[in-house]
Amino acid sequence: MLKKKKFSGGGTQSKEYPIIAESSRVFPEGASVYVDDILWHYVAMERGEERVHYESRNLEEILYYVFKPITALLAEKYAVANRIKGKDFRRLF
């Protein structure tokens, strides 16, 4: 369930990669990961409002959400750099 909350954070953050944050203290822009007493949290913020909040006891589940946009970005960059004129980039081989 998405909750709208305002969070204040500090420091700097890459727009492409999430950071590990202190519990309940995430950056107002981009993605953050934090752990409380029993759960890992992945929070994506936009303009200070929570857009996505996944929580799990299993770190691997949270890592899926961390690496999903990173993997998509890397795949997109690879497809652009290795395109063959006149061929669909989604070809298998």
Image (cartoon, rainbow, N blue to C red):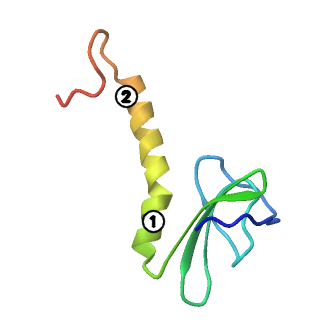
| Residue 63: mark | 1
Residue placed at 39% from the left, 32% from the top?
A: 78
| Left or right: where 73 falls relative to 44 | left
Q: Residues within 10 Å of mark 2 (few under 14, many from 20)?
A: some
90, above or below 84, in the image: below
6, above or below 23, in the image: above
**At label 1, which amino acid type do we have?**
Leu
Residue placed at 76% from the left, 66% from the top?
A: 5
89, above or below 65, in the image: above
Quadrant of the frame with the N terminus? bottom right
Which residue is at the front of the view, 2 or 40? 2
SS at circle 1: helix
| Left or right: where 75 falls relative to 42 | left
Question: Pointer 2: what residue?
Answer: 79
SS at circle 2: helix
Q: Check whether the beta carbons of the residues at disc 2 and disc 1 lie within 8 A of each other.
A: no
